[in-house]
């Protein structure tokens, strides 16, 4: 490995650790400071933090890999995600920011649900916290797999070294800096990711003979597949629904919607939304460009790629000076680490606020809760390492399973709890259990290839909430709040 690559990576790691140290000195003395950064995030930080923690290594590995292998038809996933994210910012963000503050300053999603539905408070906290920890262990593992693939490809065989190094750096700044460190590093990492996804497609299209968009399109049509750039050829209704329905997952992703809870004021939400959607549009377009034009470059130069999910890594080494290659590797690590840190912190928050504080020590001091939170981060990280130890794991498959689990379990629950006064605690519990259970059964039955499991899970969860809520008494659990889309 070139010295320049190491220089860029070391500078990147040093920057992340420096931000963690800054956050540790600034706002980790209280549970609210450690878990939500004191609810004082700047809208730009909240926006890029939500985006970076959302996209993960999937943006630079999974999505370009799918496009490289199957063509532009896979872009429907990105379109569905963009639509879902926009609706999430419009419907969920302002309401969740306001209601979590008014419902006894709820610091976690399980705590908000418990405060929103006091008749089923304990059950909701336990069930939702279990779902969060289980699915986030899988989700975190997907990020570590991405880190392992980077080091296995770029460093000739150090898969577990990559897994351990990725987690090690994340643990340091997350354990000590808490939510503020995670959010600030996400902001920086989001900028790095977007810049990398702008640079790479441009360089691919301007490098070597036969470059350019028209030449790329002609080569793909003649040498790969005449329908490679078609978004509709061979697309079935179920196939379209399975890809576009990724957008449904946004409403139930705890590591994303927790950013809504932490933005400094309700009036900042529209500003954060606009920044987030612009960042997302640019980044998704760049990821599509890497996959499609990357395939062109490999075909033009007669190169073979064993694992499509490594196209970003391979092109980084082939096309750039070592210092820039190191920067691009840092962008990939940024995508991975931003999501891993967010997932670890949300899991830790649930273990601390919804298990330890509820069952073991109701009178725990702020210092004790912060300490338990730090220990919990490390424990979830260890479980994720065990899951990620399988080098043959697919980043896209792991992400899709966890995304569906959260989307189906929490999506309808969050939307209806914020907007429907008639919803009851029993309905909330039913939605959680039915949503998560349906996804698990669908995956176990091998039906994911027929229809993405988030669709039956989301629909079943919504139906369970409505039916059970209508069959049980409304105990006046909804507090009259003034919610606003602005």
Image (cartoon, rainbow, N blue to C red):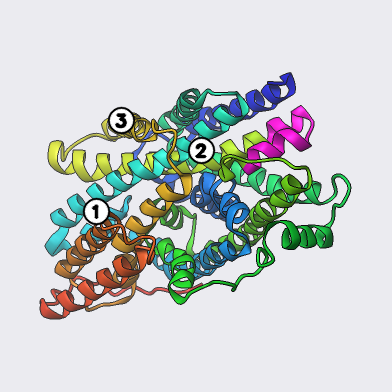
Estimate the spatial distance between the alpha carbons at disc 1 and disc 2, rounded to whole Å.
27 Å
Q: Is residue 287 visible?
A: yes
Counting residues from the N terminus, which is met first, the one under dot 1 or under dot 2? 1
Mark 3 Cα-neighbour bin, 10 Å: few <14, some 14–19, many ≥20: some
Badge 3 is on which residue?
379
Residue 423 seen in the figure:
no
Marks 3 and 2 close (CB-CB < 8 Å):
no
Q: Is residue 299 left or right of residue 348?
A: right
Residue ID for mark 1: 128
Q: CA distance from mark 3 to mark 1?
A: 19 Å
Q: Residue at x 24, y 62 (%)?
A: 438
The kind of secondary structure the magenta stretch mainly shows is helix
Depicted 142 relative to depicted 479: above or below = above
Q: Earlier in the sequence, mark 3 or mark 1?
A: 1
Indicate whether residue 45 is drawn in magenta: no
Quarter in which the N terminus is drawn: top right
**Which residue carries the number 2 mark?**
146
Disc 3 and disc 2: Cα gap in Å? 20 Å
Give me the residue at 66% from left, 26% from top.
11
Picture coordinates of residue 75, whole percent (x, y): 59, 63
What is the x, y in percent for residue 390?
39, 33
Question: Which residues are the magenta region?
Answer: 311-327
Of all residues shown, which one is farthest toward the right?
A: 209
- The x, y position of residue 2, in whole percent, is 72, 21
275 and 77: which is toward the camera: 77
SS class, disc 2: helix
Vertical comparison of 43 with 383: above or below: below
Please tell me which residue lies in front, 210 or 338: 210
């Amino acid at each position: 490995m070139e010295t320049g690559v190491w220089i860029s990576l070391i500078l990147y790691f040093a920057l992340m650790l420096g931000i963690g140290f800054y956050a540790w000195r600034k706002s980790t003395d209280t549970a609210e400071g450690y878990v939500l950064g004191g609810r004082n995030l700047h809208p730009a930080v909240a926006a890029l933090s939500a985006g970076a923690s959302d996209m993960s290594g999937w943006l630079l590995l999974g999505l370009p890999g799918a496009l490289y292998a199957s063509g532009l038809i896979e872009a429907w996933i990105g379109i569905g995600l963009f639509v879902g994210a926009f609706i999430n910012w419009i419907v969920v963000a302002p309401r969740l920011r306001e209601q979590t503050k008014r419902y006894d300053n709820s610091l976690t999603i399980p705590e908000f649900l418990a405060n929103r539905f006091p008749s089923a408070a304990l059950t909701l906290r336990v069930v939702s916290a279990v779902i969060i920890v289980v699915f986030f262990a899988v989700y975190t593992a997907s990020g570590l797999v991405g880190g392992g693939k980077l080091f296995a490809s770029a460093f000739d065989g150090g898969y577990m070294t990559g897994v351990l190094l990725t987690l090690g750096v994340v643990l340091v700044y997350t354990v000590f800096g808490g939510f503020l460190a995670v959010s600030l590093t996400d902001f920086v990492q989001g900028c790095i990711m977007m810049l990398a996804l702008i640079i790479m497609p441009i360089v691919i299209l301007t490098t070597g003979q036969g470059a350019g968009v028209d030449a790329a399109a002609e080569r793909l049509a003649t040498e790969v597949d005449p329908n490679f750039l078609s978004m509709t050829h061979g697309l079935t209704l179920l196939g379209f629904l399975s890809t576009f329905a990724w957008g449904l997952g946004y409403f139930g992703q705890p590591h994303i919607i927790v950013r809504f809870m932490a933005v400094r004021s309700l009036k900042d939400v529209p500003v954060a939304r606009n920044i987030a959607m612009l960042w997302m549009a640019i980044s998704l377009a760049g990821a599509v460009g890497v996959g499609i034009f990357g395939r062109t470059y490999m075909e033009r130069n007669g190169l073979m790629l064993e694992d499509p999910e490594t196209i970003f890594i391979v092109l980084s080494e082939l096309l750039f000076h070592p210092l820039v290659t190191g920067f691009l590797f840092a962008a990939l690590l940024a995508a991975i680490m931003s999501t891993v840190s967010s997932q670890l912190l949300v899991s830790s928050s649930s273990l601390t606020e919804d298990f330890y504080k509820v069952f073991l020590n109701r009178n725990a001091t702020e210092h004790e809760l912060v300490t338990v939170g730090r220990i919990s981060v490390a424990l979830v990280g260890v479980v994720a390492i065990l899951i990620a130890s399988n080098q043959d794991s697919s980043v896209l498959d792991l992400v899709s399973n966890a995304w569906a689990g959260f989307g189906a379990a929490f999506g309808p629950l969050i939307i209806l709890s914020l907007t429907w006064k008639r919803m009851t605690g029993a309905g909330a519990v039913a939605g959680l259990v039915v949503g998560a259970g349906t996804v698990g059964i669908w995956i176990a039955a091998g039906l994911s290839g027929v229809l993405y499991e988030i669709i039956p899970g989301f629909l079943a969860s919504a139906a369970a909430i409505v039916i059970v809520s209508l069959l049980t008494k409304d105990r006046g659990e909804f507090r009259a709040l003034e919610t606003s889309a602005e």
